[in-house]
Image: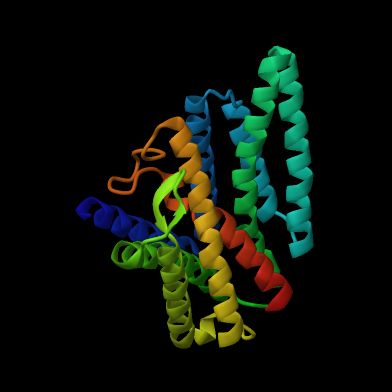
Amino acid sequence: MIKRTISSTLILVIISLAIYFFGVGGCVWLIFLAGLLTQWEFYKLLRKIGQRPLIATGILCGTLLMFGSFYVDGPTSAMSSCAELLCLSMIIVVVQALLSHSIETSKDCIMSTIVGILVPFLCCFPISLYHEMSYHHLSNSRYICTLFWMILVTKCCDIGGMFIGKRFGKRKLAINFSPKKTVEGLWGGVLFSNCIGIISLFFCRRWLPDKLGFGKAIILSTFLAIFSLVGDLVESVVKRLANEKDSGFILPGIGGIFDLTDSLLFSIPLGVLYLKYFIL
């Protein structure tokens, strides 16, 4: 617990310093770094399962995807560039795999590499949110606060689920690959996320989108909490297949970067879509 607290504090310090000195650029570059490290750890786990991802090619394609989502103008062209680069990445992976491996090996290379490229593709959504909010004439500070409001709400589901699950958990949620998770823990996490979402919205109202009222905040908090569990379960399946407890060792007490970002991979893109179509 002490190591986890120290690692969490260090992460918060690094994030705060990056945003203080570099603003939106620092925030986006942190997303770049987290996305690529998550992708790299994911590929390592796939290797332990017996897959053969083209790691260098996959990470290069992931880098191009995230750069394309930021260094373009306009919200539409941001995601359009990502879709185009994703298609190009898939073509590159298929051609390289077919030219350098047998047919049977190529199948594993192609599938595992493309699945890994989806990690930075999902990271493009919080980056594209910057363009979306700029298009609606919302300040950089509102973008940063909105993004971290969603991250806070998502992570609070983990905290609430852990405490409620330990105290009241009886019915197993996914016993085959995550035996510690319970139905009671899930609903406890959702409730805690909603409470934190409403409280933080009350105190940070002027730094968040004007149309993010309490009703929409509850809906968004619920979606973020539920889909944080989806990401967590996906990582649990991969780690169980690889016979690993953690995705890495870069963060003492936490594990790897994938262990930190798993709950965000599906929840944040969903949150960005909700903001885009119902709030902004």
Residue found at x 70% / y 12%: 102
Task: Find residue 181 and report its image quarter.
Answer: bottom left
Q: Position of residue 75 (x, y in %)?
A: 74, 64
Residue found at x 49% / y 72%: 149
State left or right for residue 72 relative to residue 52.
right
Examine the rendering and report whether any part of residue 189 can be seen: yes
- Residue found at the far top of this picture: 102
Way the structure is coloured: rainbow
Q: Is residue 178 above or below residue 155?
A: above
State the quadrant of the N terminus. Answer: bottom left
Tally the marks: 0
- Residue found at the far front of this picture: 171
Q: Position of residue 82 (x, y in %)?
A: 73, 49
State the quadrant of the C terminus. Answer: bottom right
Q: Is residue 70 above or below residue 156?
A: above
Residue found at x 35% / y 41%: 250
Task: Find residue 119 and report its image quarter.
Answer: top right
Q: Is residue 48 above or below residue 240?
A: above
Residue found at x 69% / y 19%: 106
Examine the rendering and report whether any part of residue 133 can be seen: no
Q: Nearer the viewer, residue 125 or 133?
A: 125
Q: Is residue 62 above or below residue 204?
A: above
Q: Nearer the viewer, residue 36 or 263?
A: 263
- Residue found at the far left of this picture: 2
Q: Position of residue 116 (x, y in %)?
A: 60, 38
Task: Find residue 158 and report its image quarter.
Answer: bottom left
Q: Position of residue 138 (x, y in %)?
A: 64, 77
